[in-house]
Image: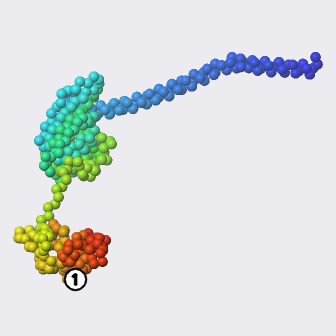
Amino acid sequence: MGRREKILLILLVTAVVGWRGLPILRAMVLGRLDDDSRRIEVLKASAAVLEDKEFKLHINERRMSDWKDRSLPPEAAEAQRLYQEWLNDLAELAGISSLRVTPEPMQVTPNASFRAVRVSLKGEATFEQLTYFLHEFHRCDLMHRIQALKVEGPPIPGGPLKILLTAEGLCLQDAPPRSHLLPRDELSDSLPRSFDTLKVASADEFPKEPGFSVRIDNELVTVTKISGNNWTIQRAAEGTSKAYHAAKSEVELFPVRFDQKDLKLDDRRKALAKHPFVQPTPPRIQIADSNDPARQTKLMGIIFDGEHSAWLFNESTRSNTVVHKGTPISVGDIQGTVTAIEPTVIQIKRGDEVWQLAIGKDLRSMTRAGSGGDDSVLSGFSEESAGSRGGESRNPGGRDRSRSRRSRRPDANSEPEP
C-alpha cells in the first residue's frame, strides 16, 4: 500500500468515526447544558403564568376592596334598616307622594360571604319625579339595583303615575361594620341660602379631594374646594333648590359612580321628553269667533227638490237661511250672489270671481273656484245645466262636463282666504 493510499484511508476512517461519534460526544459533553436550557424555558413559562395569576389576584383584591367600600353594612338586618331609610330620603327628595317604604323578608343566600336585602317602595309620582328618583338611584355608588319596577299610567290625563318597585342591596360579610349607610356629619354653623361656604364638625370620613357631592336636608351640593373642615360648595345641584340649613343639620356623602359622573339629569330629561305614559292630546275644539259673522255661518245642507236650495246656519244667532240660485248673500264683510248649487258645494260670485263653499264649512273657509260662474270645480251639476238637459250633465257637443271639470281642478290648499 503506498503512501497516498494510507493517507486516504486515514482520512476515510477519521470521517466515519467523526460522523458516527460526534453525536455521542456532543451528548456526553453538551447534553447537560441542553437539559438546563430546556429547564430554564419551562421555569420562564411557569414564572409568566405566576405573574399573570398575581396580576389577576391584585385586580381581584382591588375589586374586592372597592366592593367592600360600596357594600351595605355586613349585618343584614341593620343593613336593611339603613337602606330603607336611605330610599325613603331619596324618594322624598324626588317628591314622590303617598309614599310607603317597607322591608321585604330576608332572602336565604347559600353563599355565606354575602347577603341580599330587599326593600319595596310604593307611591305616586309624575314622570319627571320618577325620572329624578331613578337617575339619582343609579348614580349613587352603592352595590344595589332595581330588582322589579311596575308603573301604572294615570286614570285621568295629567294625573300621577302609580309606582311599585323593589330595590335590592348587597352586604358583604367582610365589609367594615358601620352605624350608618354613608359617611355623614353635621354642620358646625348654619348655612343661609346666599352662602357658598360651609363648615362641618369633622371631615375625616369624607373624600380628601374636591369634586364629590353631599346631601344637606333636601339639597344636593357639590364640594369644589377643601380647606380642612371648611368647604366651598356649588349650591342646588341636580335640580334641587337652595334652602336655609340650621346648625347641626345632617351632611351626608352622596357618592357618584365613576361611569355616571358626566351624565346629568337634564340629559336624561331631554332623552325622555316624550315618555310612554302621556295620553294623546285631545283635538282642539274650534269655537266660532263671536265677532266674525262669516266664521259663524256654515253651509249645513243641500236639497234637490226641483228648486235646488241650500241651508246656511248661524251658530251665534241659531238661525237658518235658505238660499237658491240668484239669492244675494251679505254676511259680515262677505257679499255675493249664489250662482250654482251642486251636490256638495255652492258657488258664490263675488265681483268678477267665483268662490265655492263646501258642506260643513263656514263662509270664511271658501276657496276660489275659477273666473266664470259656469265652470264648477267639483263633479256634479249646476242648476242651469240640469234644467237644460233634463238632468244630464253633458254639453251640446256631447263631451262629459264633469270629466272636463275634474281635469282642470285647481289646488284647493293653495287658495287664499276670502
Residue 226 placed where, x, y %?
A: 27, 45
Q: How is the image coloured?
A: rainbow
Q: Nearer the viewer, residue 394 or 335?
A: 394
| Residue 96 placement (x, y as % from top left) | 15, 44
Residue 340 position within the rendered picture, expressed as x and y whole percent measured from the top left: 18, 76
Residue receiving disc 1: 352
- The reply, left or right, for residue 352 in relation to residue 307 is right
Q: Image quadrant for the N terminus?
A: top right
* Secondary element type, mark 1: loop
Q: Which residue is at 12% across, 71% downward?
A: 305
Type of amino acid at the residue the image marks with label 1: Asp
Residue sitting nearer the eye, 320 or 104: 320
Residue 281 visible in the current orientation: yes
Q: Is residue 189 visible?
A: no
Q: Quadrant of the C terminus?
A: bottom left
Q: Is residue 5 above or below residue 398?
A: above
The residue depicted at 18 percent of the width and 55 percent of the height is 281
Q: Horizontal placement of 327 versus 168: left or right? A: left
Q: Residues within 10 Å of mark 1 (few under 14, many from 20)?
A: few
Q: In terms of image quadrants, where is residue 400?
A: bottom left
Q: Is residue 344 left or right of residue 209?
A: left
Q: Residue at x 27, y 49 (%)?
A: 268
Q: Residue at x 19, y 69 (%)?
A: 343
